[in-house]
Every structure is written in C-alpha cells, then in structure tokens.
Image (spheres, rainbow, N blue to C red):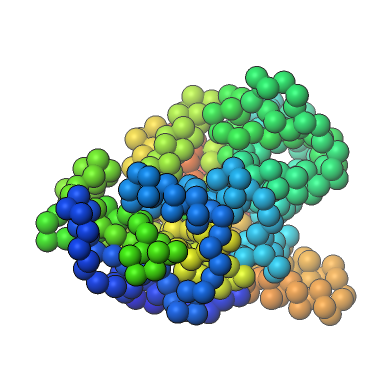
Amino acid sequence: MTRLPAGRSLLAVALGVSWQHRLLRHHVVPAAWRRQCFGAGSKAEDSSPVTPLLKHLMFKIKSTGPITVAEYMREVLTNPVKGYYMHHDMLGEKGDFVTSPEISQIFGELIGIWYVSEWMATGKPKTLQLVELGPGRGTLTDDILRVFNQLGSLLNKCDISIHLVEVSPKLSEIQALTLTGGKIQSELDVTSPVYMKGISKAGIPIFWYRELQDVPQGTCFYLAHEFFDALPIHKFQRTEQGWREVLIDINPKAPDQLCFVLAPSATPATEYFIQGKEARDHVEVCPDAGILIQRLACRIQEDGGAALIADYGHNGNKTDTFRSFRSHKLHDVLIAPGTADLTADVDFSYLQTMTQGRVATLGPLKQQEFLKNMGIDVRLQVLLQNSSDTAMHKHLLQSYDMLMNPKKMGDRFNFFALLPHQRLARSDQKVNLQHTKSLSAPVAGFGELVWK
C-alpha cells in the first residue's frame, strides 16, 4: 500500500511502500523462531553503508534474538552514542523534515495566543510555567515568548518561566542559541533534575530537563508539537493463529540488513495491548504515549493548567503508519538506521482513553480548522498590510497555503487538548467532548476566537 507523506515530508513525493508488501519468503529456522520475513528495502538502497548503529543492533539481535519495533525505534532515535536525535540538526530545508514553526511565524504566534487565552480562562494565576516537550530548535517557544512580550501589560504581574524537556544534546544547544543567544549555564549539581538553564532575551528564566517528571509541579501549560509521533510503537498483525507481534531480525538473504518478522506465538505485549473488540488486521500501539498522557492528566487534575498536542494522527482507524524520512523523502525504515527520522501516526483515541477520565479532552481537530478558529486569516491580513515587500508577501502567502491547504498540512495535522473538568463545567449545557460546537464557553481554537 503506498502511503501519502505527512508533515515530515513536506517537500517529498510519496514513494514509500508499506512493510506488508515486502514479503520475501517463508524460511526454515530453529523451531523457536519460525516466522515470515519482510524485506528491508528497495534495491536502490541495498548498497547503503553499514552504520555503527546497525552493527550495534545486529550484535544485540545475535545475542538475544529479534527485537520489538519499539526497541528498534528507541535505539535508532535516542541511543546516547549514535541516536538520530542526539547529535545533529535534522530540521529545515537542509535537514530531513520541516515543521510548522519553521514555515511561518504566524503558527507560533497563534499558539502563544492560545496559552494566554487559557491562562486568562483559568483565572489568571500568578505563575505560568510553559512546558514544551521536544522543542526542536526552540522556534515555537521563541514565537510564543514574543507574544508574551507583546502582551506584557496583561502578563506583567504573572511569574512566567519556560521548562523544556529535551534529551538531545545537539538540539538543546540550538534551543539555547535561539532563546538566549547562547547565554546559558550548565548545572554542575549532578543531583539536580535541571541540566542546563538560561535567561531569555526578555528576561524570562528557561530550564532544561530530560524527563517530564523532573519539571516542578505547579500551574503548567504543556505543549507537544510533533513529539508523540516519535515515541516508540509496538506493531501487531492478525494471523490465522491469532495476533502476533511484529519484530525485527537479521535478514537471512542479506546478513548486513534487517527485516520484519512475526513472533511465533503471542508475546506479553500482544496479550496486554490488543483489545478483544479490535476490528483492524494491523495495529500500532505506543505505550510511552499512554504513560505520558497519564502523567499530564494527573498533573492537570491536581494543579490546573492545560495541554495542547499537535501532531499527525488518527482516531483509532489507521493500521500501518510506521515510516522514515531522510532529506524530505520517504526512506526505508530498516536501511541505514541512525541516519533518518522514524515516525508513526498518533492514535488520538488511545490518548483519550489513557486520560482515564481525569481531565476533559477536546479534539482531535484538523489544523486547518484550529488555525482558522484562532484567527490566522486576520493575522495574515495584518502582516500583508504592514509590509510593502513583494518577496515578503509571496512568502507569507506560500506559508499560509502550506499550513492551511488540506492537501498539505491543513488536514494532516490535528490539535488535541487536555483541560481540567472545571474549565468546561461553567457551561450549563452538557459538554460534548467530540463536538466542541456545543460548548457555550468555547476553548480558543476548538471554538472561534473573538478578536478585540
């Protein structure tokens, strides 16, 4: 099945082939591992060099047997020595993919307005901790801080701080340059959860952490833009013998390549994650996303605040979405691991389930509709009127089209929010979490924002 590119392949053409269509053959192996083997990629890529991470993975497989897709993703993306995210800048035209904040300042400005709107709706608390998960280059936070600065008269009595959850040493360096001009201080106390800190250009303190649980409790407003799609997934396939987990093994036809295989029997993950009513033949589950959502829900339930998640995904209806991008093109997920991004669509229905009713949820809502509700058309006209430069006009219009066009990012990305139940309880009507138009006190983005 050919897949259309999502946000990480904005400049690409859909050339990838789903792993189910790469069946090589049944082959005889020791009884413990009788399975189907799925090929690792196109002939054009078969001559790719053996990367250090591939050597590491093959040694692990030879030592302990086939690994889960989740373990593969975790190693490829965040291995401390050779992980994809750890040591290079993958964003922008010279990288492997482009994100919305890198396309237009309008995107980040509207997100900033969303947080100010929710801060006001929660009674203007005296502290505001903005927590971004996986901040990329820091561009989105920088745009949000510009909004906070422009609305200084509204926020001047609020104690604002920025808390960034980032595991990549390379990206944290870039974030520090973007947000502080490089004026940072490494935390020398090894017992401190903060590994780096600095002051923004406007004087707002910024702290870096490796885990969400290290961020101090308080009135936090959380942001996760293209973060959940990079969390490790488990893959499962329905067979005549029942559900089997998809694993990754060494390709018997090519000893220097990897391939997909099916476990010979049900694994613990199969028993735990596959629901009895599941109608699909192929399922992807992200346990890390479930744990993270539970932590966010507990924090918001206890301390208030809100969370806004923006990512490409679905509502529990898609099957095989695991893919890879390199140089803005679809790339085989098993070729040259460590040199390309790995991603899978977010299952928003799973995220909603994992809140366990602790918070209210809104969405998922298409990016096109969310940004329109936030007033992107008004903001675009203001910027066009304030500039007489023809090149700037062209850039603004092209950026708007990229964000809003349903065939580009408009329909591929979704917004999903976690809010305290009391935030929506002010309405006399019964809140319909799937159809937000029924709210008499709409949340910005999920209802039309009134500009004054």
Q: Nearer the viewer, residue 254 or 192?
A: 254
Tell me the quarter of the picture where residue 11 sits: bottom right
Identity of the residue drawn at 73% across and 33% down: 196
**Total marks in image:** 0
Residue 363 position, x and y percent, is: 44, 52
Residue 20 position, x and y percent, is: 30, 69
Q: Nearer the viewer, residue 167 or 205?
A: 167
Viewed as shown, does residue 144 lie left or right of 370? Answer: right
Viewed as shown, does residue 167 lie left or right of 73? Answer: right
Q: Nearer the viewer, residue 303 or 347?
A: 347
- Identify the residue at the far left of this view: 241
Task: Judge whether residue 275 can be spotted in this image.
Answer: no
Task: Judge whether residue 83 can be spotted in this image.
Answer: yes
| Above or below, 315 relative to 163 | below
| Above or below, 194 relative to 109 | above
Viewed as shown, does residue 349 lie left or right of 114? Answer: left
Identity of the residue drawn at 44% across and 77% down: 42
Q: In which quadrant will I find the N terminus?
A: bottom left
Identity of the residue drawn at 79% across and 49% down: 178
Identity of the residue drawn at 42% across and 47% down: 60
Residue 138 position, x and y percent, is: 71, 49
Residue 61 position, x and y percent, is: 38, 50
Q: Nearer the viewer, residue 232 or 246?
A: 246
